[in-house]
Amino acid sequence: MGLGWGLGKPLDKGFKFVFNLGLAIGAPKATLSGTGTALSTSQAQADIAAQQQKINDDASKLIGLPVIKIGVGYVF
């Protein structure tokens, strides 16, 4: 769902400006991973899994994520 604004007709020559503001609806989900010798220990893997769970728990409270798009174009 979003709301947008644009300046300039699509086929007119010159610069075009676009601004969109919206909400991406859905359940956000994070996946964390790490590589390297320091992250290969069982404690590091447990910490990564715990942090991933915390992020996903916090993100599950959201109904969506805000989205802002700004664009500039030129038609020759």
Image: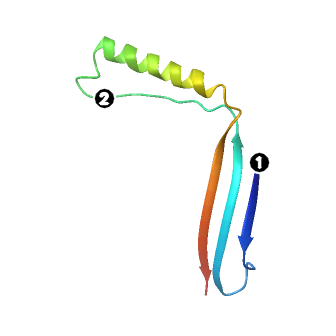
Say which amino acid is labelled 1.
Met
Kindly identify which residue carries mark 1: 1
In what element is the residue under mark 2?
loop
In what element is the residue under mark 1?
loop
Closest to the camera, between mark 2 and mark 1, is 1
Asked whether 42 or 4 is in front, the reply is 4
- Pinpoint residue 59: horizontal percent, then vertical percent: 60, 28
Work out how far the residue at label 2 is from the one at label 1, CA to CA, in angstroms. Answer: 37 Å
For disc 1, the neighbor class at 10 Å (few under 14, some 14 to 19, many from 20) is few
Q: Earlier in the sequence, mark 2 or mark 1?
A: 1
Taking 40 as reference, is 72 left or right? right
Residue at image coords 67%, 87%? 13
Residue at image coords 59%, 21%? 57
Q: Quadrant of the C terminus?
A: bottom right
- Pinpoint residue 66: horizontal percent, then vertical percent: 65, 45
- Pinpoint residue 26: horizontal percent, then vertical percent: 70, 35
Q: Are marks 2 and 1 in contact (CB under 8 Å)?
A: no
Q: Quadrant of residue 51?
A: top left
Q: Is residue 17 above or below residue 4?
A: below
Taking 53 as reference, is 68 left or right? right
Say which amino acid is labelled 2.
Thr
Mark seen at residue 43? none
- Pinpoint residue 28: horizontal percent, then vertical percent: 62, 33
Taking 31 as reference, is 44 left or right? left
Residue at image coords 45%, 16%? 50
Q: Is residue 66 above or below residue 57?
A: below
Kindly identify which residue carries mark 2: 35
Q: Quadrant of residue 46?
A: top left
Taking 43 as reference, is 25 left or right? right
